[in-house]
């Protein structure tokens, strides 16, 4: 499995092409570290998927019993050094390192969001331990879910702001949601199913942020990665679900099927075309009104956990959410969800 990164590699490649030797070196370092992750992770994740067992069991951890979170420090090591040195575990006090506590608190809020709103106990629904590692690599400009755990780089300051990735709850919840997707629909990380995987991570990431802030759908900023941009990037965030394509200067997300990107980059545009379902979710949530997680979120969660599969495309997801809205609520709600998908050209 390709690790699910928060920042698409196509952005790093674009920055590496600029006439700025220091920026090129910075971007290439993260690209190189990401490439080695890809080859090393395959075997383990394939084993998880083929055996159909929780990855915690494969990692030799104790059987599930209640909520468990832990944060490790990789000490600027790479893949072979994961998870790293244990710095904080369930029930333990704060660590002197702020990044450790941010990763811990973010995982805690995301865990509680899933339990309180959707009745889901951790990513696998069976209290699989939420493991996070901080200080991955050297100035590593990304965060990712590797099939087993969350991993956060420090950021170089040029591409991503130093120490920013653990500060945005939408980023933390985005990564954890990749775990939820892995244990539910298993949306394959390529093409439309991959864009839907990214979309789910953004939608539940944004909802978790709104839940923590107790914001109604029409009050929220709908941004993913607010405050994470480094000095070489300009804008408000990495993505905007409300206005895809406007979050920052290299944001190339479409908001409508007529602008769908047919590309081989980014696993077939998984971080690009996710703008289309992202906009549909925003429209559905604001159309339904109130808190996004109360109605739209439950509709999406129902579709994700009971109707979608690894090869589901945009059309199938539109149909699944409309059906879910009708099953959970009624014709009026189904019509609002249907209109949202029509507005982005999917249905
Ligand atoms: Zn992602």
Image: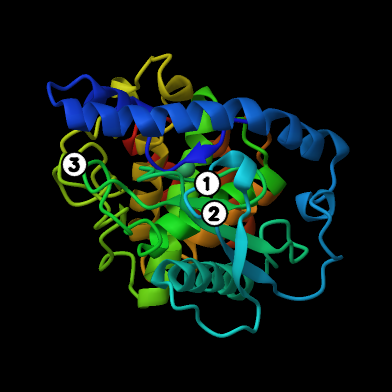
Few, some or many residues within 10 Å of mark 1 (<14, 14–19, 20+):
some
Q: Is residue 189 visible?
A: no
Few, some or many residues within 10 Å of mark 2 (<14, 14–19, 20+):
many
Q: Are marks 3 and 2 in contact (CB under 8 Å)?
A: no
* Secondary structure beneath label 3: loop
Circle on res. 248: 3
The x and y percentages for residue 129 are 70, 64
Residue that mark 1 sits on:
77
| In this view, 2 is above or below 86 | above
Residue that mark 2 sits on:
74
The earlier-in-sequence mark between 3 and 2 is: 2
Mark 3 or 2, which is nearer the eye? Answer: 2
Is the C terminus in the top left, top right, bottom left or bottom right quadrant? top left
| In this view, 93 is above or below 233 | below
Q: Are marks 2 and 1 in contact (CB under 8 Å)?
A: yes
Specify whether 307 is left or right of 253.
right
Report the residue at 36% width, 62% height from top. 168
Report the residue at 19% width, 31% height from top. 22
As measured in the structure, the alpha-carbon distance from the residue carrying label 3 to the one carrying label 1 is 30 Å
Q: Is residue 305 visible?
A: yes
Report the residue at 40% width, 61% height from top. 166
As measured in the structure, the alpha-carbon distance from the residue carrying label 2 to the one carrying label 1 is 5 Å
Specify whether 253 is left or right of 148.
left
């Amino acid at each position: 499995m390709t690790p699910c990164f928060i920042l698409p590699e196509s952005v790093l490649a674009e920055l590496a092409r600029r006439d700025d030797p220091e920026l090129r070196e910075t971007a290439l370092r993260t690209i190189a570290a990401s490439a080695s992750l890809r080859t090393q992770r395959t075997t383990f994740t394939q084993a998880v998927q083929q055996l159909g067992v929780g990855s915690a069991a494969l990692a030799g951890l104790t059987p599930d019993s209640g909520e468990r979170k832990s944060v490790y420090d990789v000490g600027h090591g790479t893949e072979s050094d994961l998870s790293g040195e244990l710095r904080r575990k369930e029930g333990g006090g704060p660590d002197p390192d702020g990044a450790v506590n941010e990763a811990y608190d973010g995982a805690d809020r995301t865990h509680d969001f899933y339990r309180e709103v959707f009745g889901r106990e951790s990513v696998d629904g069976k209290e699989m331990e939420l493991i996070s590692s901080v200080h991955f690599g050297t100035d590593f400009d990304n965060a990712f879910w590797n099939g087993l755990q969350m991993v956060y780089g420090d950021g170089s300051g040029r591409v991503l702001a130093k120490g920013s990735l653990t500060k945005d709850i939408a980023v933390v919840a985005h990564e954890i949601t990749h775990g939820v997707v892995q244990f539910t629909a298993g949306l394959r990380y390529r093409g439309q199913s991959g864009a839907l995987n990214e979309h789910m991570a953004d939608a539940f990431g944004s909802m978790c942020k709104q839940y923590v802030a107790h914001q109604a759908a029409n009050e929220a900023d709908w941004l993913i990665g607010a405050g994470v941009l480094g000095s070489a990037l300009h804008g408000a965030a990495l993505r905007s679900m409300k206005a895809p394509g406007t979050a920052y200067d290299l944001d190339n997300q479409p908001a409508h099927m007529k602008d769908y990107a047919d590309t081989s980059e980014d696993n077939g545009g998984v971080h690009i075309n996710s703008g289309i379902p992202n906009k549909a979710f925003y429209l559905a949530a604001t159309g339904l009104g109130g808190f996004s997680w109360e109605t739209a979120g439950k509709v999406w969660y129902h579709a994700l956990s009971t109707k979608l599969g690894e090869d589901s495309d945009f059309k199938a997801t539109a149909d699944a959410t409309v059906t879910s809205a009708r099953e959970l609520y009624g014709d009026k709600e189904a019509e609002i969800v249907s209109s949202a998908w029509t507005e982005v050209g999917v249905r």
